[in-house]
Image (cartoon, rainbow, N blue to C red):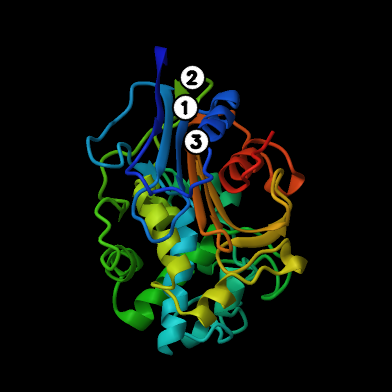
C-alpha cells in the first residue's frame, strides 16, 4: 500500500569536492520532485572520486531495507547485460574471445541451428536470431516445464531468423554469452563478475540470484508487484546491488581501469543502422537543453516487474547518472526526444544552464 507520509531523502551531500563546481543540486532535485519520481538517483561528476550525490524519493512500503552505505539493494535487471559486455571485452583483450567467431567455436554443444553462424558480436547486439523468452511468459514462472539451460534448453530451440539479421531484443543472447564466458574462463558468469569487476573496485554489495533473499520491491498502482523468480534471468538480468556499485563501475570505465582504450571504444561504438546499439548498450550523441554542444551518451536500461533502471555515462563530461524507479506507471521518456524525465535529469546534471 502507499505509505501515508512519503519518505523523501533530499540530496545527500557528500564531502566537499565530490562534485563539479558548477553542479546544481537544487535544480537536479527539482527535476526529480516535479516528476513525482519514486526511487533512487545517484549522480557522479568526478571520476576520480568514489563519492557522489544521491537523491532518494521513496514513498512505498512495505519494503526490505538495508543500513549499509547504499541504503537500498536494487535488482539491476538488464544493466546486467552491460556488465556481461564488459566481461566479454576483457576476454577479447586477453585473446580468449574473438567478437567475430561463431558461438560454436566456444560452445560446440550449443544446439541452436544458428550456432555455426551467429557470432559473439551478434549476441552482444541482439542479432543472433535466437528464440526469445519474452515470447514464452511461462519461462520465468515456477511451473515452466522446459529447460533453461542456455546450451541445450530453450535458447537452443527453433531460431527466429538468420544470424546477423534484424535487431531483436532477446534475453537468450546474454544467457548464451554467460555460457561462453564460463567455457573460456572456467568460471561461471556471476563469479567472474565478482572476480574481474567487483573485487578490483572493492565493491561490497553486488551479487546474483539466487543468493539474495530480497531486493527492493516494485509497486504497480501502489500495490506490491507479484513475486518474481529473478534467478531465471541468469546472465541477461540476474545481478543486484546498490547505486554506489554501478557508479563505481561507470567511473572505472571512464578512468580506463576495466578496459583499455581500444576495447572500450569498440564496446561504445553505436551503430546508427541498429538504433545506435553498441555492444551491450546504446551509444549516441544528442543535444541536451542548456548544453552548447551535443553530448555523447552511453545508455543502458532495464526493467523487471515494476522496477525500472537507467544507467547513463557521459564519457566526454566524466559524468555518471543512475536511476532506479520502483513504481509503475512511470515514464522515463527518451533522451533523444529532448524532453521527459531522463532528458531533464541529464540536462540538469550536465549542463550549467540547467534543464529549464
List the residue tagged with mark 1: 219
The quadrant in which residue 282 appears is: bottom right
Q: In the image as oriented, which residue stretches furthest toward the top?
A: 4
Mark 3 vs 1, N-terminal side: 3
List the residue tagged with mark 3: 25
Q: What residue is at 66 percent from the left and 41 percent from the top?
A: 353
Residue 222 is tagged as: 2
Q: What residue is at 48 percent from the left and 54 percent from the top?
A: 79
3 or 1: mark nearer the eye? 3
**Secondary element at tag 2:** loop
Tell me: 67 left or right of 24. left
Pinpoint residue 145: horizontal percent, then vertical percent: 43, 51
Mark 2 vs 3, N-terminal side: 3
Q: Residues within 10 Å of mark 1 (few under 14, many from 20)?
A: many
332, above or below 319, in the image? above
The span from disc 2 to disc 3 (Cα, nearest Å) is 28 Å
- Tags 2 and 1 touching, CB below 8 Å: yes
Amino acid at each position: 500500500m502507499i505509505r501515508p507520509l512519503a519518505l523523501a531523502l533530499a540530496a545527500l551531500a557528500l564531502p566537499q569536492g565530490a562534485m563539479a563546481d558548477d553542479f546544481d543540486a537544487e535544480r537536479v532535485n527539482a527535476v526529480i520532485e516535479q516528476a513525482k519520481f519514486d526511487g533512487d538517483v545517484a549522480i557522479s561528476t568526478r571520476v576520480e572520486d568514489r563519492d557522489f550525490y544521491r537523491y532518494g524519493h521513496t514513498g512505498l512500503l512495505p519494503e526490505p531495507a538495508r543500513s549499509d552505505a547504499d541504503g537500498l539493494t536494487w535488482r539491476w535487471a538488464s544493466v546486467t547485460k552491460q556488465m556481461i559486455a564488459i566481461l566479454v571485452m576483457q576476454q577479447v583483450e586477453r585473446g580468449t574471445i574473438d567478437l567475430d567467431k561463431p558461438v560454436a567455436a566456444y560452445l560446440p554443444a550449443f544446439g541452436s541451428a544458428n550456432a555455426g553462424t551467429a557470432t559473439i558480436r551478434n549476441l552482444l547486439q541482439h542479432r543472433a536470431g535466437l528464440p526469445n523468452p519474452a515470447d514464452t511468459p511461462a519461462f520465468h514462472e515456477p511451473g515452466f516445464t522446459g529447460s533453461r539451460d542456455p546450451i541445450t534448453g530453450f535458447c537452443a530451440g527453433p531460431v527466429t531468423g538468420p544470424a546477423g539479421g534484424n535487431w531483436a531484443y532477446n534475453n537468450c543472447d546474454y544467457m548464451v554469452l554467460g555460457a561462453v564466458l564460463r567455457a573460456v574462463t572456467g568460471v561461471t558468469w556471476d563469479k567472474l563478475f565478482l572476480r574481474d569487476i567487483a573485487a578490483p573496485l572493492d565493491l561490497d554489495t553486488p551479487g546474483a540470484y539466487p543468493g539474495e533473499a530480497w531486493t527492493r520491491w516494485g509497486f504497480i498502482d501502489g500495490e506490491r508487484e507479484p513475486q518474481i523468480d529473478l534467478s531465471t534471468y541468469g546472465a541477461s538480468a540476474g545481478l543486484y546491488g546498490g547505486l554506489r556499485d554501478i557508479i563505481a563501475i561507470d567511473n572505472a570505465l571512464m578512468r580506463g581501469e576495466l578496459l583499455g582504450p581500444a576495447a572500450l571504444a569498440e564496446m561504445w561504438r553505436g551503430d546508427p543502422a541498429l538504433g545506435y546499439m553498441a555492444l551491450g548498450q546504446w551509444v549516441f550523441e544528442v543535444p541536451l537543453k542548456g548544453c552548447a554542444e551535443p553530448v555523447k551518451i552511453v545508455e543502458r536500461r532495464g526493467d523487471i516487474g515494476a522496477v525500472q533502471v537507467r544507467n547513463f555515462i557521459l564519457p566526454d563530461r566524466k559524468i555518471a547518472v543512475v536511476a532506479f524507479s520502483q513504481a509503475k506507471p512511470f515514464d522515463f521518456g527518451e533522451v533523444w526526444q529532448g524532453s521527459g524525465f531522463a532528458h531533464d535529469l541529464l540536462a540538469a546534471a550536465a549542463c550549467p544552464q540547467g534543464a529549464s
